[in-house]
Amino acid sequence: MAYRCNVLLCTCTMCVSVGALKIRNKLEEEIKKYNLEDEVQIILTGSSWLCTKGPTLIVQPDDVVYQFLKEKDIPNLVEEHLLKGRPVPSLMYIDPEELNPIEKLQDIPFYHDQRLIALWNRGIIDPDEIDEYIARDGYKALAKVLQDMTPEDVIQEIKDSGLRGRGGGGFPTGMKWEFCRKNPGSPKYLICNADEGDPGAFMDRSIIEADPHSLIEGMLVAAYAIGAEKGYIYVRSEYPLAIKRLDGAIIKAREYGLLGKGVFGSDFNFDMEIFRGAGAFVCGEETSLIHSIEGEPAEPRQRPPFPVERGLWENPTNINNVETLSCLPRIINFGAKWFAGIGTEKSKGTKVFSLAGKINNAGLVEVPMGITLREMVFKIGGGIPNRKKFKAVQTGGPSGGVIPESMLDLPIDYERIQEAGAIMGSGGMIVMDEDDCMVDVARYFIEFTRDESCGKCSSCREGLDAMYEILTNICKGKGKEGDIEFLEELGEAIINASMCGLGKSAPNPVLTSIRHFKDEYIAHIRDKICPAKSCVELIEYSIDQEKCTGCFICNVNCPTNAIIGEKKKPQTIDKSKCIKCSVCKEVCRFDAIKVE
Amino acid sequence: MSNKKVGSVLVLGAGIAGIQSSLDLANSGFKVYLLEQTPAIGGVMAQLDKTFPTNDCAMCIVSPKLVDCGRHPNIEIITNAELGKVMGEAGNFKVEVRKNPRYVDEDKCTGCAACTQNCPVSIALYPVEKISIILRKDDTIKVDAILEEYKDKPGNLMPILQSISKEYNYLPEDVLKYISQELDISLTKIYQIATFYNAFSLQPKGKYTINVCFGTACYIKGGNRILEAFERELGVTMGNTTEDLMFGLETISCFGCCGQAPVVTVNEDIYGHFRVTQVPKLIKKYREVESAENNA
Ligand SMILES: Cc1cc2nc3c(=O)[nH]c(=O)nc-3n(C[C@H](O)[C@H](O)[C@H](O)COP(=O)(O)O)c2cc1C
Ligand code: SF4
Ligand code: SF4
Ligand code: SF4
Ligand code: SF4
Ligand code: FES
Ligand code: FES
């Protein structure tokens, strides 16, 4: 039975966190009320659209997007649009510049410059329905590979496409496969690294939640190429929804004969298993991940030998990132030439970024390599909220660095970003504005890596601890002359002396912020001020007597009763009691709280 | 009295002091004989974890020196040996050294240590005492069921601990001991894994675990202030549980919900765009749910 229209409702972790499931129930109720069940179909999709604007839904075939939905909006929406066919402008996306509602999905700048390869099916299909995936050319690449291509052909195709690992390293995928295939050891293993530990990144989660079959098909293609019969997907335990969807998808794929013995009736056997992590960042490192699956303490080990030579249970093992694998079906279907035609000379194809932080349109973005950071932040991201000034973007998480405004015209490309001192990383991209203190952000990352260091190398374990202490002191206004130079020296030493990628890259956030924002460090150390007004020990709260209307809200909410004054009269803050919790700033509707 | 100095020195005792002296002397050109009674150099420092007052790792300080000492062309190490007679006078001594037998050909031994694990004498002298752990009956049933599921899989420790953690909300000590006994895995190894991952806890957790996201996006949007507000409200610091075992307060590095930053979760419930002022309301909400349950 054909439906007159489809309602695509995003039910990713994010939209659920802001009530997407309530919206679904209400929608069902309302649709029933108007007896539209036979005409309108609700499709629950995975992470897809503007994540900050959730819950969102799209009505097809008109392609109208609605955002910030509340339960009470639904009756009106169903009656007006679904019943009477009149879109509701008040619920549409509002352009932050023009302030007018935009009706069609394609017209929103956020989507306009995106190009979907890894996210081919995002928000279009129900991730729990394998048939919807198949209807969009799903498992066609697998059939092509099994029928028409030898494993060597597949490897050559991927080499020609120029695909590089999306997990952070950027190692050419085809080459890695070839090493693994040529290694005489057997059996071989394929591992998908979905231990997205980089704080502030959600690409892999979104891919799995929106389109788990792309990953499964990608893994099948990779397994065929390297000659593996068994695969593991290492997913971090913080992603329960992704694990659930993936689990369901694997079961369906087995039912359809796409996994198991004799895939598609060929003599190729492959099956996979989900392995749940338990919250350790270092497990993203490949040797550590292997130890974790083996049930050993998850400390990295020296490489070489690389996992392609000696990996899981001492056998050749190929590890790829979720995004790397999810691109494969499209590369096989459309050909290496097509993929290599996108991007820059050395970085081919597209890259998925999770855009977050101080940005209007946070969300998952897939763009061709080579677009500039400026386009990313201001065009796709829609700029900085509340008319604040842009300060920097952080890429690569705790292994990466900050890129300042002056370098915004940098194209996104593995080598070019590295030249700026940051790394492409797995795709976390956090935008910061004038309120963010670069020293504090550097301290934050060092605190993170210090906690996550496995402790095997003394340079990483003790060195990061020392850096953390110095940075904490600087943030407290206790920095000394010479701290900056010492941080630089220590950072170099940690990079040189540590064994695994964690230690080798952990000082990067500090080193890049010193490189690009040295004046902020100097202000903290010499003048004892925090230019961004963020470091608690260096700021004070007070109330602007002109602006304060005496509404008394702050007085009631202050946890330490530090605000004194009578109702309807301007209030004052007793600085001896104030603990700088910022509650008053949050509740004041008249912008009367000053921070200096 | 002859005052002629010879170019060699005997250092007695290869602890940190002896090693450092030997290195200094050897570096200034003297031939050093480093005598040590035990079979290995390093002394007490090599057995310490941290050193006073700086809390530096002892091994980190001493191990490079051990290597230097072993490789130094001017140092000859004589271990497993004792000093006998000392003759001569300052500037020119003659000593007798008694070397105790090692019963191993030092030129051939590679130090693989395979023999130490198989030595029948030490096994007879220090038999590992096994106290058999018996759990309560319902616990035995639960744990046995989990063990049965994973028994024959390689690398089963992680999934087992995850299942135990799910069942009990933490890893109870006697259950870990029981697993060690049943699977014949050393308790040390189980603890090593149990303490490595953030998801495991050796302490009972609260009924509601409040997780404040400390990922980058949430941090720059005030995650730390939210954490402080919870700490104030609950009267416990991060990583701890309220006395009534109702609320545990933890941080997590990103839920992958960064678009809704800052994010807080309570067990399975996710709250996006969280504000400091919501903290008391949230606690109140769960306390009310709880008292409603108790009254029912
Ligand atoms: C500390 C550390 C953390 C890492 N975390 C991840 C991760 O979360 N996800 C990922 O795919 N790769 C991660 N990597 C990179 C992997 O080690 C590995 O290079 C990657 O999974 C290879 O896949 P690719 O060739 O497809 O990029 C991490 C590396 C290090 C050193
Ligand atoms: S660099 Fe750090 S995380 Fe990596 S092995 Fe060494 S101590 Fe562990
Ligand atoms: S909330 Fe703002 S306006 Fe109201 S009393 Fe406080 S400072 Fe004044
Ligand atoms: S910052 Fe917090 S403690 Fe200080 S006055 Fe405002 S609400 Fe009160
Ligand atoms: S077993 Fe190993 S350590 Fe023992 S004597 Fe032989 S080579 Fe040396
Ligand atoms: S930390 Fe103990 S070896 Fe250095
Ligand atoms: S940073 Fe908090 S959810 Fe990602």
Image (spheres, rainbow, N blue to C red):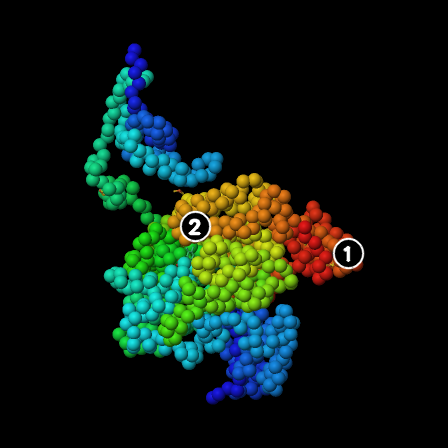
- Mark 2 secondary-structure assignment: helix
Give the residue at the far front of this rendering. A345
Q: Nearer the viewer, residue A535 or A277?
A: A535
Looking at the picture, tell me which residue is in the foreground, A208 or B51. Answer: A208
Q: CA distance from mark 2 to mark 1?
A: 51 Å
At a point 58% along the width and 48% down the height, the residue shown is A519
Evaluate whether residue A263 shows in this view.
no
A341 relative to B17, above or below: below
Tell which circle, 2 or 1, labels the residue nearer the N-terminal end.
Answer: 2
The residue to which callout 1 is attached is A546
Residue A573 visible (yes or no):
yes
Residue at 48% x, 72% y: name it.
A115
Disc 1 chain ID: A
Three-letter amino acid code at the position of disc 1: Glu
The residue at the point 61 percent across, 42 percent down is: A526
Amino acid type assigned to the residue bearing label 2 in the image: Gly
